[in-house]
Image (tube, rainbow, N blue to C red):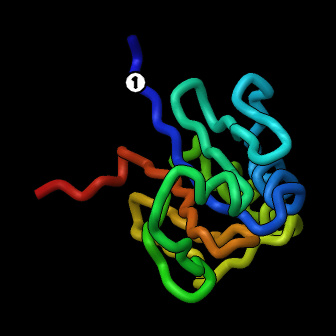
Amino acid sequence: MSKQVFINFPVKDLNKSITFYEALGFTINPQFSDDTGKCMVWSDHIFVMILGHEKFSSFTNKPLADSKRSIGGIYSMSVDSVDAMNGIMEKGLAAGGFEPNEPRDYGFMQQRTIEDPDGNTWEFFFMDFSKLPTN
């Protein structure tokens, strides 16, 4: 059996979050979705569960963090090209995302960061292995 990754986020406005994640290129998996949360598919192995606060709270005894004020993680996704990265970012920004810093160029890797409407932080990057520094 292949391994899969499910990242779970509490969201204030499920419909706003759906719009944002669909703009980035995620699709909804109805099998794991209902009125309280949606399973957003990035690939055959990577899924993001966006769950209303009440639903998310049913899985934990801890209070929910305010991800607009503090950061608990950065979730990075590779893409096939710089153009793909820029296209994803443009769509995400138009759908309510926020770019907290300037794009970064490390020579072998281009990277951009976007926050979803709830402040969860994503990075999209393209890595050109032919430009990796050699020691």
Query: What amino acid is at disc 1?
Result: Lys
Residue 71, position as x, y percentages in the image: 48, 78
Judge whether 104 appears above or below 13 on screen: below
Residue 25, position as x, y percentages in the image: 76, 44
- Looking at the rendered image, the quarter that the N terminus falls into is top left
Judge whether 98 appears above or below 34 on screen: below
Judge whether 44 appears above or below 106 on screen: above
Residue 66, position as x, y percentages in the image: 59, 80
> Most extreme residue toward the left, as rendered?
135
Q: Secondary structure at mark 1?
A: loop
Q: Is residue 75 left or right of residue 114?
A: left
Q: Is residue 7 left or right of residue 82?
A: left
Identify which residue is drawn at 44% across, 72% down: 72
Identify which residue is drawn at 30% across, 53% down: 132
Residue 104, position as x, y percentages in the image: 51, 75
Identify which residue is drawn at 10% across, 58% down: 135
Q: Nearer the viewer, residue 125 or 76?
A: 76
| Residue 89 occupies quadrant | bottom right
Per the image, the residue denoted by label 1 is 3
Q: Is residue 83 left or right of residue 110?
A: right
| Residue 16 occupies quadrant | bottom right
Q: Nearer the viewer, residue 88 or 65?
A: 65
Q: Residues within 10 Å of mark 1 (few under 14, many from 20)?
A: few
Q: How many marks?
A: 1
> Most extreme residue toward the bottom, as rendered?
69
Identify which residue is drawn at 80% across, 59% down: 17
